[in-house]
Amino acid sequence: MAEKLTDPNKAAHEIIQVLEDGDAIRNDGVRLTAANKNPWYVLATIYGEQPDWAIAWKHDKQLAAKNRRAWNGWFCDGLSEADRADRAQKTGLMPDDLKPLSKDELAEIKKRFAARMGRGAKLPLKDKDINFSEVFFSKFVCFEKFVFENKSNFHSATFNRTADFCSSVFMKEAYFRRAFFKSHAGFASVTFNNYAGFRSAHFCEEASFKWYKDRENNKAANPVRFFGIAEFSSAKFQSSTRFDDAKFLTRVPQFHAAKLYDDTVFPTPDNYTDNWPPLKGKDVMPATDQKRAYNRLRLFMNRSLQIDEEQFFHRQEMRCKMALADWWHKPFYWLYAWLSDYGNSVWRPMAWMIAVMLSGALFMLWWQGAFTFLPRESSGFDWTLGLLGEDDPWAKLREAFGWSISNTLPFLGFGKLYYGELAKDLAWPLKVVGGVQTLLGYVLLFFLGLGLRNRFRLR
């Protein structure tokens, strides 16, 4: 059934009214609860909300640090020393920053919590799900370096201002299904230890899933990392989207039916396993599903004319195909990879072509007795190749390399012109080598042309 909209000219998630108590009414009629009524938000801002002027790169950092200490001290109370050190490493904090709250700290926090939530209100339970679903965040939200130890639910939450989750860690599932980010969405250097669900989320401005850097260009402790499923299917991105240096360690992110902005960046390392999952391994996404996910990303890069990125995801698809292929098909994929890096390399087919020419020429010289491949002690190896005794010391060398080049590059046409008579009198092993060179030459020329086409973005 289609959603009944208050204003047909606006999207369903648009806020059409903010009530006196802070609640908000969406265009589809859903009532969102004011953040100040949510116990988890009150704990997250126990020492006060950020001022109205605050944004991610300009806010009250001392206040943010005090709020973070209260949240992390409360939810990390039952952790072992090893677990506390693990969370500290993931967020870039010190283990002592996550130690249990002191009696004085806890008393102060409980007092402030009761003042905002009402007498008798109790702090959220440490072992229960963290629930921010259908919450209306009217102010800048600073969750920087927060530890979300339990399952976290931000389903249908609306962030009317900047949302900053930089360097936070989600130890269990994180649900942002249908969440609406009206301003900057900062997820730089976040660690998603489990499922990260952004299905049908809406990003109006920049969405940052990159490695966080401050204004002095200092990097955070870690890049953004997805240890589990990264689900962005049906999400909408209306501005720059950055996954620079993001690490998808076990699964390729899902962007099926998503609307990506043209200015979307993904990591494309030389060694793909630096940022993308291997093809096999424990808890690793099956190659069949990886292929479908890479196909979706390749098609997007093709439409947005990001040719280098398109080629990267093409190579990823081919690696998946090779893993899925029957054993009798695998050699073709291996050759495709070795000879041309799946059609992406220019230097690789050129190097193979030079190797084919050199091998043919040396074989001819060896067959004619011009030199031997054996070491000096066995044969008295002559580094002059046995050619200096001739009137023209380079005659045999020119003949061998000319013959080899004409075999490898037959389209040049000088093979019959200069070596037609020579070819008639050649021994059958040399004829076989020449035929193989011609076959390899055509194959390598094709890969060279394919590499040049892709390298220079020819269509």
Image (spheres, helix red, strand yellow):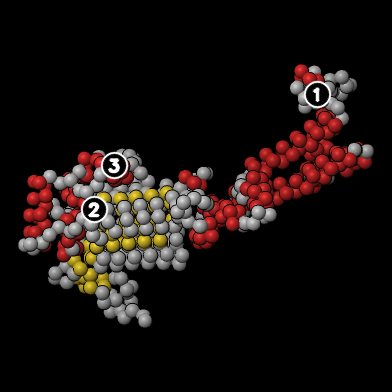
Sequence-first tag of 1 and 3: 3
Contact, mark 3 vs mark 2 (Cβ under 8 Å):
no
Badge 3: residue crowd in 10 Å (few <14, some 14–19, many ≥20): few
Q: Position of residue 214 (x, y in %)?
A: 30, 43
Question: What number of labels is visible?
Answer: 3
Q: Nearer the viewer, mark 3 or mark 2?
A: 3
Number of the label disc, if any, that sits on residue 385: 1
The answer to whether 61 is drawn above or below residue 426 in the figure is: below
Q: Is mark 1 in CB contact (under 8 Å) with mark 2?
A: no
Q: CA distance from mark 1 to mark 2?
A: 75 Å
Identify the image quadrant of residue 381.
Answer: top right
Q: Which residue is pictured at 26% across the width and 77% down the height?
A: 29
- Residue type highlighted by circle 3: Ala
In the image, what residue type sits under mark 2?
Cys
* Percent coordinates x, y for residue 139 in the rendering: 21, 59
Q: Which mark is residue 82?
A: 3
Within 10 Å of disc 2 (Cα), the crowding (few <14, some 14-19, many 20+) is many
Question: Which quadrant of the structure image shows residue 90?
Answer: top left
Secondary structure category for the residue under label 2: strand
Q: Is residue 330 left or right of residue 138?
A: right
Within 10 Å of disc 1 (Cα), the crowding (few <14, some 14-19, many 20+) is some
Please name the residue that numbered disc 2 is placed on: 142
Visible residue check, residue 176: yes
